Image (cartoon, grey):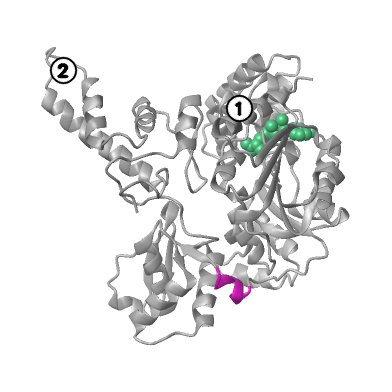
Amino acid sequence: MATDYDRVPYPCHAHPQTHPAHLAVMARLRGMRPAAPEACRFLEIGCGDGGNLMPMALEYPGSQFLGIDLAESSIERARQSAARFGTSQVEFRAQDIMDLKPGELGQWDYVVAHGVFSWVPEPVRLRLLAVCRELLAPDGVAYISYNAYPGAHLRAIPREMMLYHTKKVAEPEVRVAQARELMRLVAENQSGRDAVSAIVLSEANRVLDSAPNLLTHDDLSPDNQAYYLHEFAALAAERGLQCLGDADYASMFGTRYPAGIRQALARLGDDDVRREQYLDFLSCRRFRQSLLCRAEIKRERQAPLAAIKECFFSSSAKTASPESQLLDDSPVTFLGESDLRGEVSAPIPKLILAALGRNWPARLRFQDLRAVIATAIGSAVPSDAVAGALRDLIEMGAAHVHHAQIRHATTVSERPRVWDWARYQQTIGTSLTSLRHHTIQISDAFGIWLVGQLDGTQTAEAIAQKHALAAKPGPDGKLDAEKALRKARKRVASGIEKLVQFGFVPPDDPGGS
Ligand SMILES: C[S@@+](CC[C@H](N)C(=O)[O-])C[C@H]1O[C@@H](n2cnc3c(N)ncnc32)[C@H](O)[C@@H]1O
């Protein structure tokens, strides 16, 4: 039977927070011993067209992947991708969550359901949780994302208006058009000057910025049920699961809040779900990515230093302060992603951030960082001191923790090549997945053309010459071929550099690092 997703396709893309390497690290930081991503069994429920699963399967040929989705047309597209890449360790099945028979599927190290829980009817939600328990291996990790309260109350404002406005319309395209029209009127009528008007304006604009298919399956979906974290945790507990935390590690600690708030959080005691619930209140959180494990697992509340010592780390933090200031106790400002600004005074975290920033986007192992610090200070530093500082930095979100080194080149080679999966995505017109499992939407015609050209057979110069051929004459009707070539070289070089920087070029690229 055709589902809404068969009628209105939903192109799926990569979600780095669901990647087995990320889930493995998150579990290790809770003291678990999860399966290695290189040799694991990974199940995605509601996998759609395989946009998340396929690049993982290509990255880990030694692991087994299964994608399940109710929409047959999505599964058909996923199977076509798998057939094209000859990935025999990935299977896609058109199946309803309600019909899953855990006994037949065996146990899985990772079970992921992104964008499913809130958007299916309640019996399916509850079955999804039960299935996670039944399918998880003893050290397995499940990931379930959902709309969260209190922030989701704001989403209800445009949703309820649009549902009322379109209640008699069955045709998805017409519903979207009418819903957008209503949101346009609502947005036009907001001054944005008082609090209510600012919220309504921002929500209406969010809807107007969403792609029509997203709008159909999200705000206009018949089911869109949000949960408070404590409600979700209670439903999971009733089915033999416990919350391991959130896939956004730094969101769990509140270390960035002022001292008064941190003290109030500390007074909440040892109940992590309770603390995180209050953090959700403070940030008016609207979306969650909860990690679950079997209820009987004894998990650590704080990352064991031994686990930190097994990991890799990265940070894009930069400082303008001189090296000498890193060695004393003077405060140094670091600028991170999204204009995040933080002041650090102690030498060990300052030296860690400076070393990571110099190597970004490459990652450093714990022992490499320890060696860098020993060289800077002129004597060995206890390993627990370095691990403790790293733990503080990742809890703050100033550094990121990883399972392994990046798997892409960081320098431009003679004949650059964008990895095969991204070039395939370019041919089918979806957003592109990097080798860091990030999603990037390239919407300009030149960017799309360039990705297609970067197949490892041509030099940047040859590509620039091709691009220059497409140059148009100036207003005087004349074409300055030399100027056009100069412009094309600049454009091609900058485009290639960006693709390398974003992680689209594999390390086996001759000449790449
Ligand atoms: C919003 S999409 C999310 C797809 C993908 N996980 C992503 O995040 O890009 C929800 C997916 O869940 C699937 N789905 C909905 N109900 C289902 C059910 N009862 N059993 C299996 N899949 C279901 C839909 O077909 C759709 O592909």
Q: Position of residue 473 (x, y in %)?
A: 17, 16
Could you say whether the residue bearing mark 1 is in a helix, strand or loop?
A: helix
Judge from the rendering whether residue 465 lies leftward or rightward of residue 283; answer left or right. Answer: left
- Is 489 located above or below residue 32 in the figure? above
User: Alpha carbon of mark 1 to alpha carbon of mark 2: how far?
Assistant: 45 Å
Decide which of tag 1 and tag 2 comes sooner along the chain: 1
- Residue 139's disc number: none
Judge from the rendering whether residue 248 lies leftward or rightward of residue 462; answer left or right. Answer: right
Q: Which residues lie in the magenta part?
A: 304-310
- Is 137 located above or below residue 49 in the figure? below
- Residue 80's disc number: 1
Indicate yes or no: mark 2 CB to ligand 1 under 8 Å. Answer: no
**According to the image, label 2 marks what residue?**
474
In reply to whether residue 499 is colored magenta, the answer given is no
Is residue 398 visible to us here? no
Q: Position of residue 372 (x, y in %)?
A: 38, 75
- In which quarter of the view is residue 201 placed? top right
Judge from the rendering whether residue 497 lies leftward or rightward of residue 3; answer left or right. Answer: left
Q: Residues within 10 Å of mark 2 (few under 14, many from 20)?
A: few
Q: Nearer the viewer, mark 1 or mark 2?
A: 1
